[in-house]
Image (cartoon, rainbow, N blue to C red):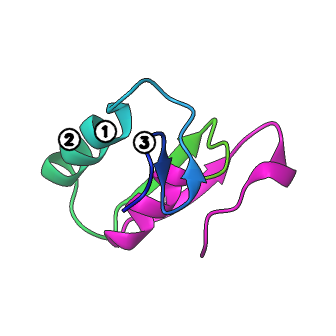
């Protein structure tokens, strides 16, 4: 289990539970294999979560060296 503020050891730089809300709503509203852009991705915690659910995700952040989400 990840410590609070992390998802799969990737730092979450968002309001508490925001990623869960985004994930739940996208999962309800968009079919699997939908294309999503994660703007302000940081280390890529949301990007990785969405990729695990079979979304096609493009991560964008001003600091590209920080992105650590697995493809």
Pinpoint residue 37: horizontal percent, then vertical percent: 53, 48
- 32 vs 46, left or right, is left
Any mark on residue 4, and which?
3
Q: Is residue 48 magenta?
A: yes
- Residue 56 is drawn in which quadrant? bottom left
Question: Mark 3 or mark 2, which is nearer the start of the sequence?
Answer: 3
- Residue 70 is drawn in which quadrant? bottom right
69 vs 32, nearest the viewer? 69
* Distance from Cα at disc 2 to Cα at disc 3: 21 Å
Q: Residue at x 43, y 57 (%)?
A: 2
Q: Classify 10 Å Cα crowding around label 1: few (below 14), some (14-19), many (20 and above).
A: few
* Quadrant showing the N terminus: bottom left
Q: Secondary structure at mark 1?
A: helix
Q: Is residue 39 magenta?
A: no
* Distance from Cα at disc 1 to Cα at disc 2: 5 Å
Q: Secondary structure at mark 2?
A: helix
- In the rendered image, the residue lying farthest to the top is 15
Q: Residue at x 50, y 48 (%)?
A: 6
The residue at which mark 2 appears reads as: 25
Q: Residue at x 59, y 57 (%)?
A: 58
Q: Residue at x 43, y 68 (%)?
A: 51
Pinpoint residue 63: horizontal percent, then vertical percent: 83, 41
* Distance from Cα at disc 3 to Cα at disc 1: 17 Å
Pinpoint residue 40: horizontal percent, then vertical percent: 64, 35
């Amino acid at each position: 289990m990840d410590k609070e503020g992390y998802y799969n050891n990737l730092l979450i730089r968002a309001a508490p539970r925001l990623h869960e809300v985004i994930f739940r709503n996208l999962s309800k509203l968009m079919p699997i294999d939908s294309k999503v852009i994660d703007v302000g991705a940081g280390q890529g915690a949301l990007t990785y979560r969405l990729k695990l659910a079979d979304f096609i995700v493009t991560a964008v952040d001003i600091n590209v060296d920080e992105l650590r989400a697995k493809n």
